[in-house]
Amino acid sequence: MEHIGEILRKRQAQTNTSRADTDTWSGAEEPEVASPSTSCPICKGAGYVHPLLPSEKPDFSRVIACRCTRQKLNEERQTLLQRYSNLGSLTRFTFDNLDPESKSSSLANQEQFHRAYQAAKAFANQPEGWLILAGPSGCGKTHLAAAIANQRLSQGYPAFFVSTPDLLDHLRSAFSPNSEIAYDDFFNQVRNAPLLVLDDLGAQSSTPWAEEKLDQLLNHRFNSALPTVIVTITPIDQLEDRIRTRLTDPKLCRIYALEEKQPSPLDYTGSLGLELLRNMTFNNFDWKRVNLPPEQRQNLAEVFNLARDFTKSPDGWRVLVGVNGCGKTHLAAAIANEHLRAGKPALFVVVPDFLDHLRSTFSPESKVSYDQLFDSVKNTPLLILDDFGEQSTTPWAQEKLYQVINHRYNDRLPTIITTCCSLDEIEARISSRLVDPKISLVFNILAPDYRGDMRSSQGTKRTYRRGRKER
């Protein structure tokens, strides 16, 4: 496969447009480059003419392509540029059919999108440095990126558009003996593209090989300061370190967040029910249970204050251990509800249900992909894992939970975990992270099941009523 630069240089060598509209007929023999129009009144089908001297006389020592030939060559050049661009159906995405204010109902998001729109148009007219477009799915990132590429093509400049997963797939397939282009040729073509538009960064499978290829690609373009547009659905601060440091370099890169992702609603799953979890607040948590011994009341007051303080400044992990009904889920839900009311994101996950949802994403009918669900749990700013240890202990389940715990442990993401199990009953590589004093605080709730108190109270009332009836 011939490099786009070689193709265009050959085409350019066949024509000279420096003296447009100064053509005169020439009977020079026509090279085999383009099919001139036989009806052209200037060259009479020859395809080439003698240019005019300043004296308006023909310069018979030279020939240049006729206007009709140049038009044909320009059309061929545009076709080559279009084929090289790899845009495919994305050629329909232009600045003209994109609302500069976005479709978001949020005024803040509309303003952010408008700034990104203006920056993209300016970049399309004069591509310099790197333009980074970030935001959730459906906010218009890919449309803006494709519009940049399409505008460059309309101006006669090359641009190469590719999604990150597709790029890696093409690189892998280049190793095949049946590949139409050698691996080195293709990789060098992408690395040195005059303008590269890299879509869906962060959506690729994260393998050591994939990370190495992306690092080589971005490092080369970074060091060479080659114009690049990068579209990422993954927040910049959650990208791999070497990539993140390049994308955030203020000398070369400009980052535009098209839309702030709205706080995720609580994932109220499990047997407790939607309304019950929503109504669990600090105001209706009974930490003064008068029927408890003083030691247990003091313990309950301490965990109450611990949870409320965490809400004010979430940092590190809190692991709440206790029997069913001791209040740990109430406190965990209260933390999440408090964050949501303040407009801050929080995700409440019942662990057994989370694993069931994760399994269901493998179904062809699933409306959410495995990666989307798994990444949302791994990377949410505040995660509450309720009923940890109640899940079925299969190797797959243990591995998924370990990946979540390990990722949040390494990134030091605020996390609340509730469990009825002693830490000795939890897998060692998980429990070792739960008890790490550098990040985690484990609190054993001594209070018994408060629902038992309610049952006892209800039982007494029923006995009393029966006694009355018997009398």
Image (cartoon, rainbow, N blue to C red):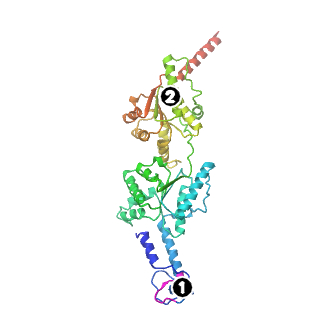
Magenta-drawn segment: 58-68
Closest to the observer: 251 or 280? 251
Q: Is residue 60 above or below residue 175?
A: below
Q: Crowdedness of circle 2 by 10 Å Cα count: few (<14), some, many (20+)?
A: some
CB under 8 Å between callouts 2 and 1? no
User: Residue 434 location, x and y as percent?
Assistant: 41, 33
Q: Quadrant of residue 179?
A: bottom left
Please name the residue shown 41% across and 28% down the image.
422
Judge depth for marks 2 and 1 and give the one in front: 1
Q: Residue 23 shows which numbered tag?
A: 1
Q: State which quarter of the image contains the C terminus.
A: top right
The single residue placed furthest to the top in the displayed view is 471
The amino acid on which the numbered mark 1 sits, given as a three-letter code, is: Asp
Relative to 182, is 294 on the left or the right? right
User: Residue 380 location, x and y as percent?
Assistant: 50, 42
Q: Can see residue 176?
A: yes
User: Residue 217 location, x and y as percent?
Assistant: 40, 58
Closest to the observer: 417 or 317? 317
Q: Residue 306 shows which numbered tag?
A: 2
The amino acid on which the numbered mark 2 sits, given as a three-letter code, is: Leu
Please name the residue shown 42% across and 62% down the image.
190
Q: State which quarter of the image contains the N terminus.
A: bottom left
Q: Crowdedness of circle 1 by 10 Å Cα count: few (<14), some, many (20+)?
A: many
Q: Is residue 150 above or below residue 399?
A: below
Q: Secondary structure at mark 1?
A: strand
Q: Secondary structure at mark 2?
A: helix
